[in-house]
Amino acid sequence: MRGSYLLTVLTFLPLAGTLAIFMLRPDDREWIRRIALAISLFEFALSLLLLRGFVLNSADYQFVELHNWIPSPPIHYHLGVDGISLFLVLLTTFLTPIAILASWKSIEDRVRGFFISLLVLETGVIGVFVSLDLFEFFLFWEVMLIPMYFLIGIWGHERRIYAAVKFILYTMLGSILMLVAMIWLYELSGSFDLPQIQNMLVSGQVVLSLRTEQLLFAAFFLAFAIKVPLFPLHTWLPDAHTEAPTAGSVMLAGVLLKMGTYGMLRFCLPLFPEAAHRFAPYVAVLAIIGIIYGALVAMVQTDLKRLVAYSSVSHLGFVVLGLFAFDPTAVQGALYQMLNHGVSTGALFVLVGMLYDRRHTHLIREYGGLATPLPVIAAFFLFVSLSSAGLPMLNGFIGEFLILAGTFVHHVNWASYAAIGIILSAVYLLWAYQRVFFGEVTQDKNRTLHDADRRERVVLVAMAALILWMGIGSVSFTRRTEASTRNVFVLMQRPQIYNARAALSSARPAIPGGVR
Amino acid sequence: MFPPREDILRVMPEIILSVSGILLMLIEPLLTRARRNVLVSLAALGSGLALVSTIYPAMLPGTAFSGLLRIDGFSVFVHVLVEAVAFLVIIGSVDYLDREHIQHGEYYALILFATVGMCVMSSAAELMTAFVALETSSIATYILASYRRDSPRSNESALKYFLLGSFATAFFLYGIALTYGATGTTQLVRMTFPTTAGGERLLDLGLALMLVGLAFKVAVAPFQLWTPDVYEGAPAPVTALMASGPKAAAFALLLRILASVSAAGTFWFWALWVSAALTMFLGNLAAIAQHNVKRMLAYSSISHAGYILVALAAAAASDQVELGVAAVLYYLAVYALMKLGAFILVSQLGGESERHMDIDDFRGLAMRQPVAAACFALFLLSLLGLPVTAGFLGKFYIFQAALASRLIWLAVLLAINTVIAAFYYLRVIVVMYMREPNQTWPPVPMPWAVTFVLSIAAAGTFYLGLFPGRVMALATQAALSLPGR
């Protein structure tokens, strides 16, 4: 599909759409919402064209666009998708209209700025997923912080400023070191172009010394690990999630966290395989701690939104574990779990946001027995909770199963510890569900709540349908991602280094004692 | 003996600037107060014409006036930069001067004279010329700093700047004397080897003293202490000028000495390294504690001088100076744009006699004056170095130069400082966007002149942030045009 401009259009359409919103008067709220929704729906429809044109069984980048941008140092405008980024782009375009619909009534203040921020955020996130030039990737990676910062800081809850500043400082600390690593990589390879660097590494044109590779890996990994977030770098997440408005939480959990795991899969593993192998045990331990710790902390939360936030820490631990198991099945599962988490946790945040719209609190003790006044919301909440807890037939099961199955082959103990997390996730989700929805209505205010209206039902049905489809029709996803996830392991091959190490290890006994 | 025609053309910008300055002083007494437009137009015309006439030195590279000046791509780059700064500051000052009841004529004349000094600094190939240029620019700036006559802070600012600045130029002058003693010349290109016995130590000492003098002028640690007081007290448009123009010129002089005198590269390297690290940390950590926007921006200026020193150290460490020099030049252009924009904006928002300079006075600015807030946010994000803005690419090239010279730890320190800096830049954005307004005064109108300057600064910030190719090519040519070591 050379010569197509689809990715450029997809990336910049939301940004162009903000111009249309700028032309409206700031107090024309209804039209601002409608136009934002129309843009995001059109964007989603366009992104479905990717599915039609996507060539199966190819690990190559598709819909590639390559233009010169900055002559010195050589930086290109290079876009492309493969099986890894394809569905992440679709996830973004799917969740944006959801986020817009979810904030239809809850945002009344500075509406224009809100929807502009959301659309700019969409541009930034899609840019991250389709960039194939390190500089360009970094540009989108950083730019996307600003709209998110405003979303949390302006339209968030009480401690929003603290959360927004914490969010942006954490992320910047990681990413600025990644920038240093990128420029260093350029000094070593002479290129910012990801496929080109990758080719040079695979063919042995550029050989990184082990120390260099480890430092570069560490710099990249730190940036991504903060974003994921991996234990113990997760402390920004509960604050950001809890304080963000619903749309912010949906985008944050749905796609922003995926940028971290995507980065690991796209950069850390294929560019620095040796370092990745050496660091894998430590990463896995952190991931497992994250899985169990996140789940345990989620269990004792009194704040419903914080509970979902900590569940993210737990779920993304699974993704990281799957990536660092170095098994095609587990990586496939990790990729799938990224999508699952985006949909399920996104849906959970939407539901929590609906409760908040009605009662203006996230505290579990303020609720109880909501199944009586809110039967529709209760039903969807149960459905989404079960998907998040990994019930077979729904999406979460497929991802967790693939991760555990793939990990089990190589590391039985990793898989066993991680499996505890699945049990715990059922515990905290169902227990929270029970406290919120079952039993008697304890608060009089809760008796008169109105159930989901038409707009909310549309959102919930769309998400539930996707959850179900990802649970039973997973092949339609995995057959598109398989070639690319397998290709990661091809890209991790390093002929020279292995030869050199083999020579080194065969020579080693001769050094101290000599030939006996 | 009259100098040849080429030499006259080569200093055309300086001639135009001086003549317009003198004309301004001559005309002013003849005009009534109401006719200030004539003065404004003349000043703007003078600096604009000087900018255009830079085409002459650009087309006639070479040494001029028996080797006193060296006109090359480098000097032309800095010429264009400082002339553009002067032009924008003059236009940006008009409404400020009216508001503060300051006489127009002399003020503009002083800006033009300061600019002459800066221009000559960038092309001086000989140290006495450099000294005269430095003094021309400095003395004009001392007076400008005191222009809010009835404000004690402005007087303090000018006095402090004058006393400490005199010390610094004395250091510089003594350094020239010592290097002359060591090498028997004040011509930079001939200073390669000491000619007298024990001259090496003398040369090193001379270079050290010159570094001290110039380090004061660019406000890097440990000679940065004067900056916050001076920047805070001076009229805001003058601060805009001081932060962008003289600093660029002093860095240009440093670079020329660094590139021409081989002893400087090796001898200065560690001094530059340590000073860069110190400056970045001192500037950024102190900026966090500030409540006054001007003071905060002053400390941020210090930290930015530290960033530029990183590139300078990179140039000193490497055999190929051009990467570091080009990074410095690019950053100077970027830095001038964003600092100028920020200070001019603050000068307007500050209100009469700069009363509303507290960060808290900017509360809810986004709701009161969305466009001004967006502009300020843009400059702050650029100072912070966020992608798409010029500040990011400037920093990017500094990182690249540092890593190409294998200054990995200095690059890491720069990275850490970027995050520290994020804290205080973002705080202003928090105040503007995330707090409710509580001001008792009406929104400040934005006159067309200020709007014009801000639009140019904002457009430039985007342009240099997205399409650095052309300007970077010029900066690289400029760097290559320096006499090699």
Image (tube, rainbow, N blue to C red):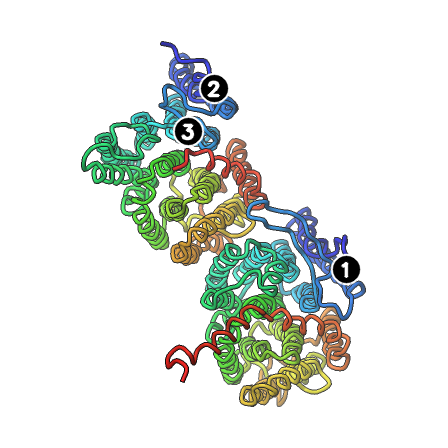
| Three-letter amino acid code of the residue under disc 3 | Leu
| Three-letter amino acid code of the residue under disc 2 | Leu
Query: Which chain's residue wears label 2?
Result: B
Q: Quadrant of the N terminus of chain A?
A: bottom right
Q: Secondary structure at mark 2?
A: helix
From the image, state whether disc 1 or disc 2 is nearer to you.
1
From the image, state whether disc 2 or disc 3 is nearer to you.
2
Residue linked to disc 3: B97
Q: Relative to A266, say whether B41 is above or below.
A: above
Identity of the residue furthest to the left in this view: B197
Q: Secondary structure at mark 1?
A: helix
Q: Nearer the viewer, residue A273 or B216?
A: A273
Query: Which chain's residue wears label 1?
Result: A
| Three-letter amino acid code of the residue under disc 1 | Leu
A3 horizontally vs B3: left or right: right
Q: Nearer the viewer, residue B55 or A259?
A: B55
Whole-percent x and y of residue A57?
Answer: 76, 71
Q: What label sits on residue B42 in the rendered view?
A: 2
A379 horizontally vs A270: left or right: right
